[in-house]
Amino acid sequence: MTPGELLRKVQRLEIRTRKLVNQSLAGSYHSVFRGRGMEFAEVREYQAGDDVRSIDWNVSARMQQPFVKKFTEERELTVVVAVDTSASGRFGTARSTKQELATEVSALLAFSAIRNNDRVGLLLFSDRIEHFVPPRKGREHALRVLRDLMASSPQGAGTDIAGAVTYLRNVLKKRAVVFLVSDFQDRSYDTVLRTVARKHDVVGIRVSDPRESELPSTGLVAVADPETGERRILDAGSSRVRSEYASWAERRELEIRETVRKSGIEMLELDTGEDYEKHLVRFFRTRARRAEAGGF
């Protein structure tokens, strides 16, 4: 892709995602992902009625009289969109590939964060850390995130979710909202993901394609695992083969759901054959209602 082609694609995607943000997501995003932390502001002399748990004992000892810490609500968020760029994302038989869907959803989340005056960062990963953009504010930074995402040329083919969230645990010093965008075709990441989710608000966004769960009745088809390179010829015209494939896909689906369940994060599932906007809006609104009811 030439620089000019990349620029035009970025501009088109910015226009589309900005429209969706303004029309659909702005209120829902703000309701769910408003600042929840408390940030230290200053110390002042203790007054009758102050909570003794807020006393700053170090300052009080130096000043020979009690002082308390004052905190203000931290309104701004740090948002990181962690995107799986492994080879399995190149698959797609409906409106788009899984990677194209992941890119558009990630752009939407980035511009939602910027519109809310939050900091946004980007992590691209496969079976290694491909690229990291530290969180910052502003439209120009959001466009940089979008350009880096669309111009990505990953070196790895596989998927290492545990490695990605471990990297984020090490670089993010303050609580953040982490959108983990992947097809989750990986194993043994639940323990480390659960650990990271204790500090950060981790939201999983799983992208999939309809043909990953069933074969069309088309005769002989060549199938390949893009992450391992393994290839096979299947007789998709055989009802027995289609049934075996569907059973295998169901077992894989159950394994993914069980691993995600054990990790303790919330998951939004998006399909390349469907309109993702309504699912994203519904997900945010459900979380917002639960937050208002004290569900988090």
Image: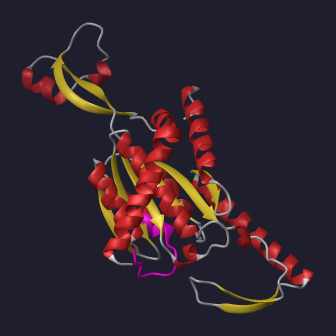
Residue 218: x %, y % from top left: 82, 83
Extent of the magenta region: 152-164
Residue 73 in view of the camera: yes
Q: Residue furthest top?
A: 48
On the question of residue 188 being in view, the answer is no
Within the magenta stretch, is there residue 123? no
| Quadrant where the N terminus is found in the figure | bottom left
What is the quadrant of residue 91 in the picture? bottom right
Q: Which image quarter: residue 263?
A: bottom right
Overall secondary structure of the magenta section: loop
Which quadrant of the figure contains the C terminus? top right
**Is 62 located above or below residue 220 in the figure?**
above
When the figure is inspected, residue 113 is found, relative to residue 140, above or below; the finding is above
40 or 268: nearer the viewer: 268
Vertically, is 245 above or below 235? above
User: How many marks overall?
Assistant: 0
Identify the coloring.
Answer: secondary structure
Task: Work out whether residue 258 or residue 1 is closer to the camera in this orientation and state it.
Answer: 1
Give the image quarter of residue 167: bottom left
Lateral position of residue 98 relative to residue 245, left or right:
left
Residue 116 in the image, given as x and y percentages of width and height: 37, 38
Q: Nearer the viewer, residue 206 or 73?
A: 206
Name the outermost residue toward the left. Answer: 63
Horizontally, is 162 left or right of 243 in the view? left
User: In the rendered view, does 229 fall on the left or right side of 52?
Assistant: right
Name the residue located 86 percent from the left edge and 83 percent from the top edge: 241
Residue 62: image x %, image y %?
8, 26
161 in the magenta segment: yes
